[in-house]
Image: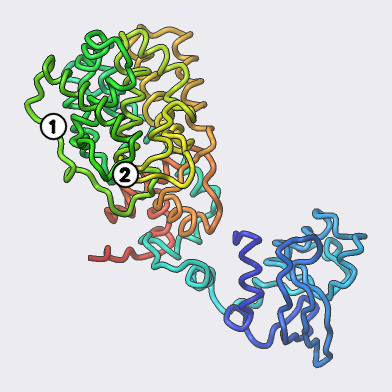
């Protein structure tokens, strides 16, 4: 089913999308002289001031669009004075009830399209999106009903959750210990802070600074935890610099403290190797996601969670997830590096990344921990509740793969739940990108309908 907002594109592009002559439901012929001005829904019909010719008679007025004729009454247009000048009701398809629409001529798009369904979707895509389609089954997957495709995404989403749980439980033993589980939570959180460009250096940083070292530093340097953890993280990341005339007085004073604490830490802890500035990606990053701000956030989370005893780390992190409130780190909330500032302060941890860590690390870890315990009805209920919380949460994701699935598979409809969003990731990564169409339920159904897979682009 084509979403209603796409009907506007078909009407505006009537010369490309519709046959000529256009035949209305009553058999009369129509020519569109001017599709009118799109209303953008300030109230009233979808298009204002259209001009059409019905059997050669010129008529001017407004045009209203719906999926079926019943949309007129469902939206309470009957009796609304704003719709009194409607001269044409445009619908995608006729539901067979001639009494549902307004008493004006009706155009059924389905009967006047210049394309078959797949061709129409391809033409709409080219008009709406400035890119080349990526899914091997596009545009043919329009032949598969949307409810079926959404069911596939949800099933793949459940499989993706099991992947996330397995990531947490990586261990040489069948069941990890509590300390191994928490180490993995720390490592995966650090991985998430790197986004796509800096995942590798963040993983290396978590290996240089394991939980045992963070706990030692907390005990050995009990004064001013903020400076302590920023010093060890910036030092180990290779991003700590010396005071300089290029910095202002505030920054130089801050750098003096960091360097003094870093030197003291290195007297107590030997680091065989640390990272360097060239290990980090700086280009094509939003300023708020600069490596310096991400490392500052890692230091803040280490102080708040990771350097504490196991029960303190687990209980706080598992109960509330990661947080970094605005005004908790004045310097790094307003800087992108030691020399560059943001136009206005921003929290070190945005909603999207906070949600991603909670959903991709914390909830899978909580489920993994339940599975480490003896099985009981209470634990099964808790696991079920966590799975539902995970799956039904509204997604904050804005990744490219999600746009591809929405635009090329779901015919422009949005993915709203985390279960479907993660299912989209697994589908795109494990099937579409690898050309495994025959193993995908959607591809398999298309093959049954006679579709032939095309080879992946080189």
Q: Which mark is residue 36?
A: none
User: Does any portion of residue 26 appear in the rendered image?
Assistant: yes
Give the Cα separation between the discs numbered 1 and 2: 22 Å
Q: Quadrant of residue 32?
A: bottom right
Residue at 46% in and 33% down: 355
Q: Nearer the viewer, residue 44 or 174?
A: 44
Q: Position of residue 262 (x, y in %)?
A: 19, 24
Residue at image location 86% in from the left, 73% down from the top = 104
Residue sitting at the far bottom: 56
Residue at disc 2, secondary structure: loop
- The residue singled out by tag 1 in the image is 274
Where residue 235 sits, quadrant-wise, is top left
The x, y position of residue 187, in whole percent, is 26, 27
Quadrant in the picture for the C terminus: bottom left
Between 435 and 286, which is closer to the camera in this rendering? 286
* Residue 339 numbered tag: 2
Point out residue 287 in the picture as x, y percentages from the top left corner: 38, 47
The answer to whether residue 175 shows anywhere in this view is: no
- Mark 2, other Cα within 10 Å: few <14 / some 14–19 / many ≥20: few
Q: Is residue 96 above or below residue 302?
A: below
Is 241 left, or right, of 59 in this rendering? Answer: left
User: Which image quarter holds the N terminus?
Assistant: bottom right
**Residue 113 as seen in the image, left or right of residue 289:** right
Q: Is residue 65 left or right of residue 271?
A: right
């Amino acid at each position: 089913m084509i979403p209603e907002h796409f009907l506007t594109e078909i009407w505006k592009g009537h010369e490309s999308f519709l046959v000529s002559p256009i035949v209305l439901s009553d058999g009369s012929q129509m020519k569109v002289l001017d599709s009118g001005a799109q209303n953008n829904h300030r109230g009233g019909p979808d298009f204002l001031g259209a001009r059409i010719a019905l059997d050669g008679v010129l008529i001017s007025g407004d045009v209203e669009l719906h999926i079926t004729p019943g949309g007129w009454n469902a939206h309470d247009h009957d009796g609304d004075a704003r719709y009194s000048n409607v001269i044409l009701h445009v619908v995608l398809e006729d539901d067979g009830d001639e009494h549902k629409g307004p008493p004006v001529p009706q155009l059924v798009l389905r009967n006047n399209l210049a394309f078959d369904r797949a061709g129409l979707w391809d033409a709409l895509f080219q008009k709406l999106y400035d890119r080349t389609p990526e899914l091997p089954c596009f545009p043919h997957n329009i032949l598969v009903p949307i409810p079926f495709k959404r069911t596939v995404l949800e099933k793949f989403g459940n499989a993706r959750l099991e992947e996330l749980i397995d990531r947490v439980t990586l261990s040489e033993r069948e069941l990890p210990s509590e300390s191994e589980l928490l180490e993995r939570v720390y490592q995966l959180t650090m991985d998430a802070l790197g986004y796509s460009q800096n995942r590798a250096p963040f993983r290396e940083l978590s290996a240089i600074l394991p939980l045992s070292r963070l706990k030692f530093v907390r005990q050995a340097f009990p004064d001013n935890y903020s400076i302590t953890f920023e010093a060890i993280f910036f030092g180990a990341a290779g991003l700590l610099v010396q005071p300089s005339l290029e910095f202002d007085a505030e920054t130089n004073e801050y750098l003096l403290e960091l360097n003094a604490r870093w030197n003291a830490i290195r007297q107590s802890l030997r680091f065989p190797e640390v990272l360097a500035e060239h290990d980090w990606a700086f280009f094509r990053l939003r300023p708020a996601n600069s490596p310096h701000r991400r490392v500052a956030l890692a230091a803040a989370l280490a102080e708040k969670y990771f350097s504490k005893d196991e029960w303190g780390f687990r209980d706080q992190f598992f109960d509330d997830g990661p947080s970094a409130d605005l005004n908790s780190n004045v310097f790094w909330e307003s800087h992108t590096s030691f020399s560059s500032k943001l136009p206005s302060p921003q929290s070190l941890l945005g909603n999207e990344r906070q949600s991603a860590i909670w959903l991709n690390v914390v909830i899978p870890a909580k489920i993994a921990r339940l599975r480490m315990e003896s099985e009981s009805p209470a634990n099964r209920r808790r696991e079920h509740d966590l799975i539902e919380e995970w799956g039904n949460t509204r997604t904050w994701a804005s990744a490219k793969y999600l746009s591809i699935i929405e635009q090329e598979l779901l015919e422009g409809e949005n993915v709203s739940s985390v279960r479907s969003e993660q299912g989209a990731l697994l589908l795109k990564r494990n099937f579409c990108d690898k050309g495994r169409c025959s193993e995908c339920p959607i591809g398999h159904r298309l093959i049954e309908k006679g579709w032939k897979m095309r080879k992946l682009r080189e």
